[in-house]
């Protein structure tokens, strides 16, 4: 009879350890599982970092530097709550600024709505600190419609503008959004300041899934040197915009305004500062097919304009999903003993719990930043977290084989990061 040894008052069952040691096919699974546990733990710690950053920046003193700024907003079609979002940009708590709305054609459904709203604002004087303009950019063959709109918006900027700001019309800014976004540029070491979108969960399951999917990207931002600019909320000094040659070198033949700006800043050894106060609330109801098309488009753009990020993402999500597949196969194998089975099950459970814990941190961020605006569905960030890696893996795999995307009805082929072809145009 073999007695189990006792060390420090703890009894070890030799048979149990022998069972584990002898089942050599299990070792790769356990090693991979342990590595994924460590990766998931680090991701949770990174989530804590992001939450602390949000809280610290909310209590930071306000910077009063507010040079004249021009905000350029490309528009196509009418999003839900269009007028309220337009009003949000026209009613910023900023001493003096200009907003330039840009459409591709006067036939765009947004054009007449903007024309009427701006005429009303000018007649009433309700936006006395805010100049405004409405520009028709026309169509371009060699670049994305949004980028073409931005270029024409920059041309219409007031010559007095010291800062150029770029924003999306489908987001809702707070009244201090512009002041918060411009403030970091008082530091000469900062080249670009940026926010990011933060999807709030809606009533539908797909809307909540989109929120869980997208905020996993937003929490990558922080006080470090590998931030990326986001075109829906970014600011740059006018002098830097021209000295970097963004219009001529980086936007002349691209579909991605923000990745191009990120590359320009990187080439110049500049710095991109993340501004938590400029996380912009977005919300969208859609079908599952529409969501998958949208999410895959984001990764296709990454594949073309930041291939190193696509490779890292593909490797990370392949590893995550492979560990789970190996674990499930192991659990389903009839020859596995009880102890190895428990080890594998516990490893998978810990990984899921750590993912849910990071999702719960995103729920806290949502409540603290957006309050009641977030509704009663912020639990989706942690409840749906187990699905996100599998959707991401699908996005990354598809992006490896596709170069065509659709943006608001217009289809593009991304030949390379410096060449775009317009395949088909859609109306606004």
Image (spheres, grey):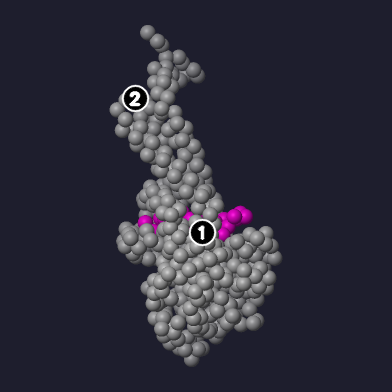
Q: Is residue 200 visible?
A: no
Return the residue at label 2. Answer: 337
- 10 Å crowding of disc 2: few (<14), some (14-19), many (20+): some
**Residue 38 percent across, percent down from the top left:** 50, 39
Residue at image point 39% right, 74% down: 426
The reply, left or right, for residue 194 in relation to residue 10 is right
The reply, left or right, for residue 159 in relation to residue 168 is right
Quarter of the image containing the C terminus? bottom left
User: In the displayed image of the protein, which residue is found farthest to the top?
Assistant: 1
**Residue 82 percent across, percent down from the top left:** 41, 76
3D distance between C-alphas at marks 1 and 2:
47 Å
State if disc 2 and disc 1 touch (CB < 8 Å).
no
Q: Secondary structure at mark 2?
A: loop
Quarter residue 377 falls in: bottom left
Q: Nearer the viewer, residue 117 or 168?
A: 168
Q: Nearer the viewer, residue 384 or 228?
A: 228
- How many numbered tags mark residues here? 2
Return the residue at label 1. Answer: 304
Q: Earlier in the sequence, mark 1 or mark 2?
A: 1
391 lies above or below 423: above
């Amino acid at each position: 009879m073999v007695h189990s040894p006792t060390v420090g008052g703890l009894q070890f069952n030799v048979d149990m350890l022998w069972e584990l040691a002898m089942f050599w096919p299990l070792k790769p699974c356990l090693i991979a599982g342990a590595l994924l546990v460590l990766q998931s733990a680090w991701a949770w710690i990174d989530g804590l970092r992001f939450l602390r950053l949000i809280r610290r920046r909310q209590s930071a003193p306000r910077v009063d530097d507010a040079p004249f700024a021009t905000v350029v907003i490309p528009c196509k079609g009418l999003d839900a709550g269009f007028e309220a979002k337009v009003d949000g940009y026209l009613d910023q708590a900023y001493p003096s600024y200009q907003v330039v709305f840009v459409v591709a054609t006067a036939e765009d459904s947004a054009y007449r709505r903007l024309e009427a709203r701006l005429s009303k604002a000018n007649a009433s004087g309700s936006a006395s600190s805010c100049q405004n303009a409405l520009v028709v950019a026309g169509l371009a063959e060699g670049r994305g419609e949004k980028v073409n709109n931005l270029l024409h918006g920059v041309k219409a900027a007031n010559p007095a503008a010291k800062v150029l700001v770029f924003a999306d019309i489908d987001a809702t800014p707070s009244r201090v959004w512009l002041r918060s976004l411009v403030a970091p540029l008082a530091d000469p070491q900062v080249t670009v300041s940026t926010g990011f979108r933060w999807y709030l969960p809606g009533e539908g399951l797909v809307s909540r899934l989109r929120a869980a999917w997208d905020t996993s990207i937003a929490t990558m931002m922080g006080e470090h040197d590998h931030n990326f600019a986001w075109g829906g909320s970014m600011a740059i000094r006018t002098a830097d915009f021209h000295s970097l040659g963004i219009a001529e070198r980086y936007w002349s033949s691209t579909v991605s305004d923000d990745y191009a700006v990120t590359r320009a800043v990187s080439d110049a050894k500049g710095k991109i500062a993340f501004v938590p106060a400029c996380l912009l609330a977005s919300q969208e109801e859609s079908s599952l097919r529409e969501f998958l098309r949208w999410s895959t488009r984001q990764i296709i753009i990454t594949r073309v304009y930041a291939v190193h990020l696509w490779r890292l993402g593909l490797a990370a999500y392949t590893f995550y999903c492979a560990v789970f597949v190996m674990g499930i196969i192991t659990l389903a194998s009839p020859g596995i003993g009880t102890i190895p089975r428990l080890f594998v099950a516990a490893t998978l459970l810990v990984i899921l719990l750590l993912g849910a814990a990071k999702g719960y941190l995103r729920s806290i961020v949502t409540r603290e930043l957006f309050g009641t605006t977030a509704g009663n569905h912020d639990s989706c960030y942690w409840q749906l977290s187990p699905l996100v890696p599998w959707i991401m893996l699908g996005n990354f795999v598809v992006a490896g084989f596709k170069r065509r995307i659709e943006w608001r009805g217009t289809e593009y082929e991304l030949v390379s990061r410096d060449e775009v072809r317009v395949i088909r145009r859609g109306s606004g």
